[in-house]
Amino acid sequence: MKTADLFERSAQDELLQIRNDLMTVYREVSADEDRLFPLRFARTTPRRLRRGRTGQAVRSRLPETGHWDPSVGVAEPQVPVLLIPDGPARASVLPYDALRRNLAGHGLDVLMMEHRGVGLSRLDATGEDLPAHAMTLREVIRDLLAVLDRARAQQVAVYGTGYGAYLAQALAVLHPERVHSLVLDSPLTSAEDEAVAQAALRDMYWNGTEPATSSTAAVLRRLAETETVDIHRAGPVVLAVHEHGGPSAVRELVDLLSVGRGRLTWNSVRQVLNQGWLQSTPYVMEHDLTSRISHTELGRGSHADGGPLDALIVDGEQARAVPPFHGEVLDLHALAPAITAPTLVITGTQDLVAPPRIARELAARIPGAELLEVRGAGNSMLDSRSQITQIAARWSACGTAHRLPEWADELAALPATPTDQALSRGLQIALAAERYSPWRLRVESVRAKREQAHVDPRARRTRHVKID
């Protein structure tokens, strides 16, 4: 089957027929248009309920097992959980099947809406893509309400990550009667957040103002001076290596580059990132229709400046394909103090996508909000530390999430998701291979120099190979 065929209505119908956890609510394409489209959502109901054990029992067992049963130490859930992943291009139904089953296994009733313009909610009733004018934040919020009405869920505990946390805040402000409690994971709060993230990345790896990484920044500046790396396009690579390997992996990579190695790892990471940003995967990540929300309404990429370590450069290039950003539809900074739902804000201390500063300031704006900082974690517990997500979601539905900051050390000790572990391990293996197999790298380096010299004769006289 061709990729394009996966978007056809017949393919979606076949998928719906073999699943028993998918539901449909017909929604207006937009407030100004009566035409309907099928908005899909997944609902996974509890398979069994488990009685909690004492917190002390968990605390003594955790170091040995590396696993925390989300149902221990708390009461039974009071409401369903609405999970909203990062986005708006991220699908909800297929990528999070296992997570929903795990939560249902611990007594939770779980709802996840397929975002309009993505996957199973991409097409209108005639099988055509949703129109561009239908892609707005206000319509997405109405979609969430329609799902809650269709599921007959009067109140829900809302767990949102990134853009999902943005929607969760909006729902809590505009429709407080529907929100029992909030968990805001690696939250997006405004278009200015990416400027905060950009500054944090540069402070660590370019300006050298962070003592722990000042020497790494010095080496990276030297690599830029010798044109070993194109520092203006290096931001996404450095950010990705940091997120999956931490400062030590960034240091090892730049050290390898400084002695003529590391090029294969650098280019491999760059190619993977380009594929992830520029290509869509049906039912997983679909950028094209949702780009108006990302760039025109949320301002993603509006702070791209082309400077050193510009992590927003690809977002900035994508933003040119849609109408420009002129300001946010909602001022969540001003609205956050109106949130009345009990709120837990979660951040990873190693997060440079949504740095801890953003979460700390958000927790200070929301009355009574609690802050959980997970030591050593990066962005999105939902995607990188799913055990923490399962615990926080269940405790929120039980009305006890405010207790989780007391368990910060135990939560930080929980393992990363298998996917995140695989990415981290792959990065470690790549760096080790370059460190211990110089002969292979020299062959690749000579080949690259020959290719560059074929295109540009001046390259024969340069001693350094420029990395894009």
Image (spheres, rainbow, N blue to C red):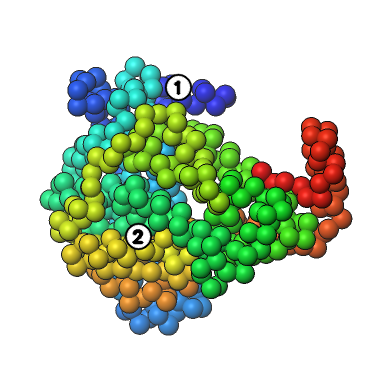
Residue behind mark 1: 8
Q: Is residue 241 above or below residue 92?
A: below
Q: Residues within 10 Å of mark 1 (few under 14, many from 20)?
A: some
**CA–CA distance in space, label 1 to label 2:** 40 Å
Q: Residue furthest left?
A: 177
From the viewer's perspective, tell me whether residue 438 is left or right of residue 158.
right
Q: Nearer the viewer, residue 50 or 236?
A: 236
| Residue at figure coordinates x 72%, y 57% from the top left | 257
> Residue 249: where, in percent of width, then height?
63, 63
The amino acid at mark 2 is: Ile
| Residue at figure coordinates x 23%, y 47% from the top left | 331
> Residue 299: where, in percent of width, then height?
36, 41
The amino acid at mark 1 is: Glu
> Residue 98: where, in percent of width, then height?
45, 51
> Residue 42: where, in percent of width, then height?
34, 41
Q: Nearer the viewer, residue 140 or 7?
A: 140
Q: Nearer the viewer, residue 9 or 359?
A: 359
- Of mark 1 and mark 2, the one earlier in the sequence is 1
On residue 231, the disc is: none
Mark closer to the observer (1, 2): 2
| Residue at figure coordinates x 38%, y 22% from the top left | 129
| Residue 71 visible, this orientation | no
Callout 2: helix, strand or loop? helix
Callout 1: helix, strand or loop? loop
Residue behind mark 2: 358
